[in-house]
Image (spheres, rainbow, N blue to C red):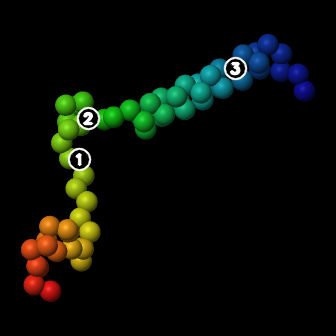
């Protein structure tokens, strides 16, 4: 099956657009979505239920 120059050009275009899409998706996934000044603040606060923190355990939580 011979597609000629048109087929090769089309396949090159498809692969180029595919690589461009993967590159843009990688940028969106790995670059920060917030301003650099916000890095110092806590974005997510983790809390573990039923866990005595060291300072709470030292004060005696009444358990």
Along the line of sight, the residue nearer the viewer: 59 or 32: 59
Nearest-to-viewer mark from 1 and 3: 1
Assign a secondary structure to mark 2. loop
Q: Are marks 1 and 2 in contact (CB under 8 Å)?
A: yes
* Mark seen at residue 18: none
Residue 48 position by quadrant: bottom left
Nearest-to-viewer mark from 1 and 2: 1
Whether residue 12 is situated above or below residue 43 in the rendered picture: above
Residue 27 position by quadrant: top left
Name the residue at the right extreme. 1
* Mark seen at residue 12: 3
- Residue 16 located left or right of residue 43: right
Q: Circle 1: is it few (<14), some (14-19), or many (20+) Cα within 10 Å?
A: few
Name the residue at the top extreme. 5
Rendered location of residue 10, percent (x, y): 70, 20
The residue lying at 72 percent from left, 16 percent from top is 9
Could you tell me which quadrant the N terminus lies in? top right
Rendered location of residue 54, percent (x, y): 20, 68
Assign a secondary structure to mark 1. loop
Whether residue 35 is situated above or below residue 51 in the rendered picture: above
The residue lying at 33 percent from left, 34 percent from top is 32
Q: Are marks 2 and 3 in contact (CB under 8 Å)?
A: no
Q: Which residue is mark 2?
A: 34
Q: Circle 2: is it few (<14), some (14-19), or many (20+) Cα within 10 Å?
A: few
Distance CA(mark 1)–CA(mark 2): 10 Å
Marks 1 and 3, the one that precedes in the sequence = 3
Nearest-to-viewer mark from 2 and 3: 2
Q: Which residue is mark 1?
A: 43
Could you tell me which quadrant the C terminus lies in? bottom left
Distance CA(mark 1)–CA(mark 3): 42 Å
The residue lying at 31 percent from left, 35 percent from top is 33
Rendered location of residue 50, percent (x, y): 24, 77
């Amino acid at each position: 099956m011979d597609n000629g120059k048109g087929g090769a050009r089309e396949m090159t275009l498809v692969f180029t657009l595919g690589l461009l899409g993967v590159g843009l998706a990688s940028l969106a996934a790995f670059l920060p979505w917030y301003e650099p000044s916000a890095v110092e603040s806590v974005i997510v606060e983790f809390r573990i239920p039923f866990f005595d923190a060291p300072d709470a355990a030292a004060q005696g939580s009444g358990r």
